[in-house]
Amino acid sequence: DGGITQSPKYLFRKEGQNVTLSCEQNLNHDAMYWYRQDPGQGLRLIYYSQIVNDFQKGDIAEGYSVSREKKESFPLTVTSAQKNPTAFYLCASTAASGDTQYFGPGTRLTVL
Amino acid sequence: AQRVTQPEKLLSVFKGAPVELKCNYSYSGSPELFWYVQYSRQRLQLLLRHISRESIKGFTADLNKGETSFHLKKPFAQEEDSAMYYCALSSCSGAGSYQLTFGKGTKLSVIP
């Protein structure tokens, strides 16, 4: 374990508020990813970034935003535009695109 | 578009019985496939990938391009194998970047 950290572990948000989830890695990995995990849905890709200052939308990017100002950090903002934000969010990184992905412990977001 | 199908949401087997977790994929390119596992209270981690042809914790998976399958097998199930298993396909999303497409997962329960 270690290498990729996500904080907080649990997060509660009121409707209409934006919230930012943290993802940090000390593996010197170039690529980082954000997934959403829902029961019975598997993992769905939200955003990914191959290098600093560059990122691409995944399959379900609407209502989310990201930044990649540093190699080791890839924060995800869940905006008020996200219609159903309550979910488990996973961050991952990989040394090279297409290589094995290493996952963080996840953040469980609940909208009240 | 790429797609990964895991037909069983839940699979229950007795300890010592053989296990087969099914995975079928749809992809027009040359597939690279993975099995990830999530044990209770642990983070998602790689179990095996087809290009390495390794056997991890007694599990094997063979890529069958004719049947577009990558089933996960183990001859004798152990209680510690109880977990959530995800099949994933790596595909090129353009400009040398790759992304993983996950199946919806199969929960394996090994009955003592």
Image (spheres, helix red, strand yellow):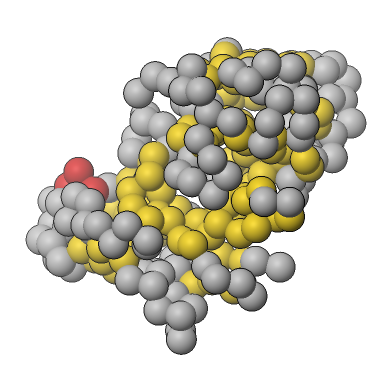
Frontmost residue, A6 versus A13 = A6
* Residue A91, quarter of picture: top right
**Furthest-top residue in view?**
A8
Frontmost residue, A88 versus B23 = B23
- Residue at the (57%, 13%) spot, across then down: A8
A62, above or below B19, in the image: above
- Residue at the (67%, 44%) spot, across then down: A45
Residue A37 seen in the current view: yes
Q: Position of residue B17 (x, y in %)?
A: 14, 66
* Residue A46, quarter of picture: top right
- Residue at the (46%, 35%) spot, across then down: A102
Where, quadrant-wise, is the N terminus of chain A in this rendering?
top left
B67, above or below B73, in the image: below
A79, above or below B5, in the image: above
Residue A4 seen in the current view: no
**Furthest-left residue in view?**
B16
* Residue A6, quarter of picture: top right
Frontmost residue, B74 versus A14 = B74
- In the rendered structure, the answer to whether residue B90 lies left or right of residue A64 reads left
- In the rendered structure, the answer to whether residue B84 lies left or right of residue A23 reads left
Q: Position of residue A78 (x, y in %)?
A: 78, 25
Q: Position of residue A89 (x, y in %)?
A: 61, 31
